[in-house]
Amino acid sequence: MSALYILTSAFILIILTILLRKTMMLPPKSLGKETCITAVVTVGVYVFTDAFFAACFTGQVGGASCFRFVSLFFYLIYITLPMVWYLFSQSFMPPVKSKIVRGILFVPYFALMVMILTNLWTQALWTISDAGIYDRGSLFQVFSTLNLFYYALPVIRIFMILCSKDREINPYLLKVLFFSAIPLIGVVTNVYLIPLKDAYPFQPFCYLVGVLFAYFFMVEQQRSIEEEKHRVELQSALEREMEARLQAQNAQRAKSTFLFNMSHDIRTPLNAIIGFAEIISKNPGAEEEVKNSVEKIKSSGDVLLSLINDVLDLARIESGEIALDLTVRDLSQVIDNLARMFTENAGQAGLQFIVEKDIKNAYVACDDTKMTRIMVNLIGNAIKFTPPGGKIIFSTRQTGDVKEDCAEYEIRVRDTGIGMSKEFKDHVFEAFERERTSTESGVRGTGLGLTIVKKLVDLMGGSITINSELGKGTEIVLRLCFQVAKPEALELERKKEADGTDYSGKCLLLVEDNLLNREIACQLLEKRGFRIENAENGMIAVDKVIHSKPGYYDLILMDIQMPVMDGYKATQEIRKLEDKELAAIPIIAMTANAFAEDREKAFQAGMNEHVAKPFDIEKLMQVMKQYLK
């Protein structure tokens, strides 16, 4: 019987070794994996010790001293195993929240430990005679019953969870109950039913069956988690797809709305330009009529340019192409300039325009061009959407003292105009959004003004809020922080800007295929003292540079889209010239290709700078100044 017991234990150990390897191969975050590994190892140690104990018990191995040592070690493992099993089963149940209760749950284990250690003197649990005869002591039944506590505890806890009103039932809780009850059955059977004089490996088999069930449960649990994870990921992917589809639909709708509005808003000034040009061509001698037509053509051209600039500006801002150009300015003077700009416009529209100003530190480092752009949009909107007889209040105040060389300023534009609906206010900063088309409102625009304002304010690190009610007016509040400067810094800045450079004698090569564009550029640049030579395409430009002497051309203004040879190719050919001085002539792209990718292509071709058409002569001069000796 002893040999059979040992062979059976060896078989169980082989199964446990395979099971341990399989358990370790589970995903790292598998539920209960670490405690399962501990339980399998402890069961393996128990099975090995139990077989050794059985061999000593039947007198097959060692003498009385060896038997006593093996018994002591066996019973230490005997009480540790249920504790490990309990901790393993807890991995699948809600944790015990009370620290006091968690502490009390360890008391039986320490009591069992004390009973085993004191048995060396009391022999109240078991005795081993000098002849190697094993016998149970008077307290063995108490000891065995107390040892059942940690086997019974998971079963009791599961029943309590299942019977509670506010239970959070794990769908696998009954399976946990099943594999937790198997070792309990094995221990009870082995202790109370099997005769003492016979040895049966019933309890180790129960442990083996228990851990096998636990392993299969963990695999099923992991598969369930993976399936749930896959389901969630699939659901998330479907939601993202739906969201992307919705965004695409909204973008398409916004695009369609934009094209509809732009079609009307661009055609209106174009129709005026073409119509008045036709009037001039038919009546060239009518001086008053020609003068009136020219003024209206210019006015319509300004409207058209404003529409196009809004679209291009938004593209540049979104591509990250625009950066702050901080210079020292008198903020009070910037406000006064804006006030003068709009006082007459408001008066012509029959509006009262009130300017309020409370600034302690007026000299600040700011980008006054972008500041002006923001205020032109905000005040311009207020004038557009306020009926005659209304009022617009433009107020600027410093909200605090200077801290770390910075001061906070609050700018408000309040009107008594038509206001906004709550629905539109939620989308007011979105591109191409307008509450009504220009046909309905009588006000032209792309719906990009406030989008550009919001992005510029974000670029400055400020905030913008809108308070508005339909039919009662709108108030827009800007909060910006500027670095405070000294008056001397402003004077230094003015001296830099008052550049009286004489450009007479400087020769520019203007490469432009459009005759009207060449004429405009020549007139503006010749007034600055430049001598201009023209080239109708890139090939002519390259030929002119090749046959020129070093230093003859000070700078080249290069268009991009041209017949025969475009600006990119022409620039590359110039950069490849053997004469290094000719190859290094500064080249500035001056083109209607105004997007970020166009700018990048220009730099890749070897151009020094990129200026978008229609160009601002002052901005062009600032760019050119860097390259003109």
Image (spheres, rainbow, N blue to C red):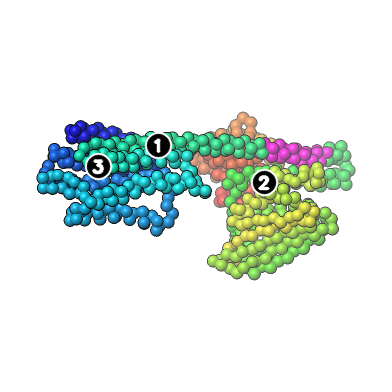
Going by the numbered disc 2, the residue's amino acid type is Glu
Asked if the stretch drawn in magenta spans residue 533, the answer is no
Q: What's the amino acid at mark 3?
A: Val
Query: Of residues 289 and 251, which is closer to you in this image?
Result: 251
Residue 34, position in %: x, y? Answer: 35, 44
Task: Determine whether 625 is above or below 242 in the image.
Answer: below
Task: Point out which mark residue 45 bears.
Answer: 3
Q: Is residue 196 above or below residue 352?
A: above
Q: Which mark is residue 430?
A: 2
User: Closest to the observer: 296 or 261?
Assistant: 261
Q: Amino acid at mark 1?
A: Phe
Q: Which residue is mark 1?
A: 217
Disc count in the image? 3
Question: Which residue is pictured at 63% across the width and 56% down the height?
Answer: 463
In which quadrant of the rendered view does residue 289 lie?
top right
Residue 85, quarter of picture? top left
Magenta stretch secondary structure, dominant? helix
- What residue is shown at x 71% (from left), y 44% (from top)? 433
Which label number is shown at residue 403?
none
- Disc 3 is placed on an element classified as helix
Q: Quarter of the image holding residue 366?
A: bottom right
The answer to whether residue 271 is magenta is yes
Q: Which residues are magenta?
A: 251-275
